[in-house]
Image (spheres, rainbow, N blue to C red):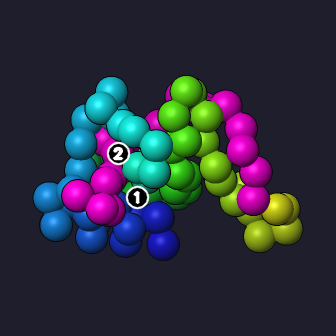
Amino acid sequence: SATNQFNNLAQARKLIPLNQAVAGDLMWYSQESAFNGDKYHVAIYLGGGMMMEAPNPARTVRIVPLRYGELFPYAGRPSA
């Protein structure tokens, strides 16, 4: 789940402030502001204000502008 991905990167100390995100970093969406709150969606940041996401199981993966509403203020860098 998106929450598990976030928690795994947090435990591995691979989170960075959102304003330091680079292409390939993961970004999460949450309706909760708490650090350990539920994350309902994860996307891959592509740089230049764009992201890649699978909006739901019925739709194909797409590249779209980054949505800032409910975007959690940390990104994850799995390769760090």
Q: Residue at x 76, y 51 (%)?
A: 62
Residue range highlighted in magenta:
61-80
The kind of residue on which mark 1 rests is Asp
State whether residue 26 is above or below residue 18: below
Q: Is residue 49 left or right of residue 28?
A: right
Evaluate whether residue 32 shows in this view: no
Q: Nearer the viewer, residue 41 or 65?
A: 65
Q: Residue at x 24, y 42 (%)?
A: 16
Which is in the foreground here, disc 1 or disc 2? 2
Evaluate whether residue 61 shows in this view: yes
Q: Is residue 54 left or right of residue 51?
A: right
Query: How many marks are shown on the rendered structure?
Result: 2
Q: Image quarter for residue 5?
A: bottom left
First in residue order: circle 1 vs circle 2: 1
Q: Secondary structure at mark 2?
A: strand
63 drawn magenta: yes
| Image spot of residue 18 (x, y percent) | 34, 34
State whether residue 29 is above or below residue 36: above
Q: Residues within 10 Å of mark 2 (few under 14, many from 20)?
A: many
The kind of residue on which mark 2 rests is Ala
| Image spot of residue 28 (x, y percent) | 45, 49
Q: Residue at x 77, y 70 (%)?
A: 57
- Residue with the mark numbered 1: 38
The CA span between labels 1 and 2 is 15 Å
Q: Secondary structure at mark 1?
A: loop
65 drawn magenta: yes
The mark found on residue 75 in the picture is 2
State whether residue 61 is above or below residue 63: below
Q: Quadrant of the C terminus?
A: bottom left
The mark found on residue 79 in the picture is none
